[in-house]
Image (cartoon, rainbow, N blue to C red):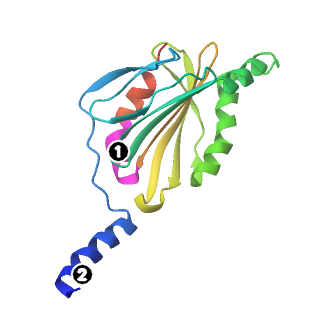
Amino acid sequence: MRPSVMRPLVFVAACALAGCSQPVPAPKEFKEYHAPDGTFQCEYPAGWVTEGGGGSRTDYSMVKFNKGDAEIRVEADLAGSLFADIGRNDGDAEPPVAKVHKLKIKRLDDEFTNYKEREAKPFSSKALGEGRKAVFVADGGIVGRIFGYHATLLTNDKRITIICQCSATDWKVLRPAFDRVIASFGR
């Protein structure tokens, strides 16, 4: 191959390895998503790709919204709700949603490289009441450092886990959109 042809290929390969990616713009419009199993509804950025969306299983459903390197992943599971029920009966002053939020941290630590989560803070969703939300930082491989939110809500029968993530360079731009999506959860 000629050197003049090799230079652009080397640049593209170097960019991919260094984590170069197109910035994800701040969403200007949002749409409403309704989980097929009726577990939850929420807003999501218009123009983002939707994958998943539940299924016939009654104990677990999930959906992902993504654009570029940014992603919002929502999981609804029965197991987390069962742990919350146990937590309601143990006499501890810590709310069940706080206990259930902590249970997911170990799995996220296994899923992400160098996962570090800050202290979870209470927040209120549109219709599901009090939840927990924490900022996290992790290594994202090709995309470099990633920033995100790990949020937890409880319904009567499901734990809702929301993972919002993006490259460190997109965090400032996308954080308000992530906050909006997390606060929009209802039933």
- Examine the rendered structure and indicate whether residue 78 appears above or below residue 67: above
Q: Position of residue 48 (x, y in %)?
A: 31, 36
Depth order, front residue of 62/110: 62
Q: Position of residue 101 (x, y in %)?
A: 64, 32
Q: Look at label 2 and name its amino acid.
A: Met
Residue 170 forms part of the magenta stretch? yes
Among the 4 quarters of the image, the one containing residue 184: top left
Depth order, front residue of 66/182: 66
Among the 4 quarters of the image, the one containing residue 88: top right
Is label 2 in a helix, a strand or a loop?
helix
Q: Residues within 10 Å of mark 2 (few under 14, many from 20)?
A: few
Q: Position of residue 187 (x, y in %)?
A: 49, 12
- Rendered residue at 41%/58% (across/down): 143
- Examine the rendered structure and indicate whether residue 55 appears above or below residue 113: above
- Rendered residue at 51%/30% (across/down): 62
- Examine the rendered structure and indicate whether residue 66 appears above or below residue 16: above
Whether residue 95 can be seen here: no
Give the number of the mark in front: 2 or 1: 2
* Secondary structure mainly formed by the magenta segment: helix
Q: Which residues are magenta?
A: 167-175
Sequence-wise first label, 2 or 1: 2
Residue farthest front in this picture: 56
Tell me whether circle 2 and circle 1 mark residues in contact (CB < 8 Å): no
Q: Position of residue 6 (x, y in %)?
A: 24, 81
- Rendered residue at 33%/71% (across/down): 13
Q: Look at label 1 and name its amino acid.
A: Lys
Is label 1 in a helix, a strand or a loop?
helix
Dot label at residue 172: 1
